[in-house]
Amino acid sequence: MLRYDDINEISDGRLYSENDMVRVDTNGCEGCSKCCESDMGNSIVLDPYDIYHMTEGTGKSFDELLVNFLVELDMIDNIVLPHIKMDNGCGFLNADKRCSIHKYRPSICRLFPLGRLYNDKGFDYILQTGECIKTGCTKIKVDKWLGIENLEHHTAFINKWHRFLKYERKKVREITERAENEALRISNISEEDLAIYAGIVGDTGIIEEKGIAEYRILKCAAFREGATEGTKAVMKTVLRIFYMEGYDHDNDFFTQFDERLKTALAELRKIN
């Protein structure tokens, strides 16, 4: 996800579609693997489509990719998502410094040095300047460079996934903000009103045992702890449905994703 006020800071200033020609063809990256050997942190974020293909190509489940330290989970823009472990370069780089899963490589790897710039209607492709050190790149059509089958369906999936992640982040933010608002309200109301509140919610016994001041502290902490558990539940639900539950590689990914999307939305709506 790229979000900048001025795309000229990171690109050639142009917006590309899948039918445009762009100078990114490295002609097989012969003699170069710098991007794969670099410490790129958590930047190679994996979406469900990536996991569908990576588990197919490696024969490993998502859990096995984690256990073998090929993939990591990390907080990315306030939610947990998987990414290629890149602190010592990519673990899928073989002894000849070539990609061992090239046919099944993640979408971000397919894009590079292109990127996606999102807008209200979807996204455009941009050419990230200064990212690829390979010289003498030639022009190639964007869709050919990506090499993704059913690119139209993939584009629709990317837009759905992007919107869903926005919804997940909003859900996490709302749970946290609601708890903070409740904690702030409890912090500021009078002892008399707090005692009335305790009676309404059935906490009178706690005040009798702990006192009104301690009850105020405990109640604020409880709201925040509840928010932590709620946000964890949201993120665990997303990871389970879209990543941990294996895909059927004999059937269409996009159909499976749409079904999982419905399931995820239904389950997330139940979490407060």
Image (cartoon, rainbow, N blue to C red):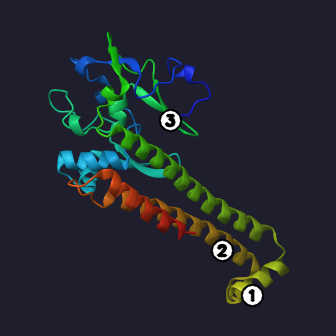
As measured in the structure, the alpha-carbon distance from the residue carrying label 2 to the one carrying label 3 is: 46 Å
Q: Nearer the viewer, residue 168 or 20?
A: 20
Closer to viewer: mark 2 or mark 1: 1
Q: Residues within 10 Å of mark 2 (few under 14, many from 20)?
A: some
Please state if 72 lies on the left or on the right of 156 as rendered.
left
Question: From this viewpoint, which residue is outermost toward the top?
Answer: 136
Residue 101: x and y, percent? 21, 38
Q: Secondary structure at mark 3?
A: strand
Residue 202: x and y, percent? 68, 88
**Residue at image x 58%, y 40%?**
120
Question: Which numbered tag is attached to residue 123?
Answer: 3
**Residue at image x 49%, y 37%?**
1
Q: Secondary structure at mark 1?
A: helix
With respect to residue 181, does 4 lie above or below? Answer: above
**Residue at image x 42%, y 65%?**
263
- Which residue in the structure is indicated by mark 1? 199
Residue 24: x and y, percent? 35, 19
Q: Residues within 10 Å of mark 1 (few under 14, many from 20)?
A: few
Residue 96: x and y, percent? 15, 27
Closer to viewer: mark 2 or mark 3: 3
Q: Amino acid at mark 1?
A: Gly
Sequence-wise, the earlier of marks 3 and 1 is: 3
Where the C terminus falls, by quadrant? bottom right
Q: Amino acid at mark 2?
A: Leu
Residue 260 seen in this snapshot? yes
Sequence-wise, the earlier of marks 2 and 3 is: 3
- Which residue in the structure is indicated by mark 2? 218
Question: Which numbered tag is attached to residue 69?
Answer: none
Q: Amino acid at mark 3?
A: Phe
Q: Nearer the viewer, residue 87 or 231?
A: 231
Q: Nearer the viewer, residue 180 or 215?
A: 180
Question: From this viewpoint, which residue is outermost toward the left?
Answer: 95
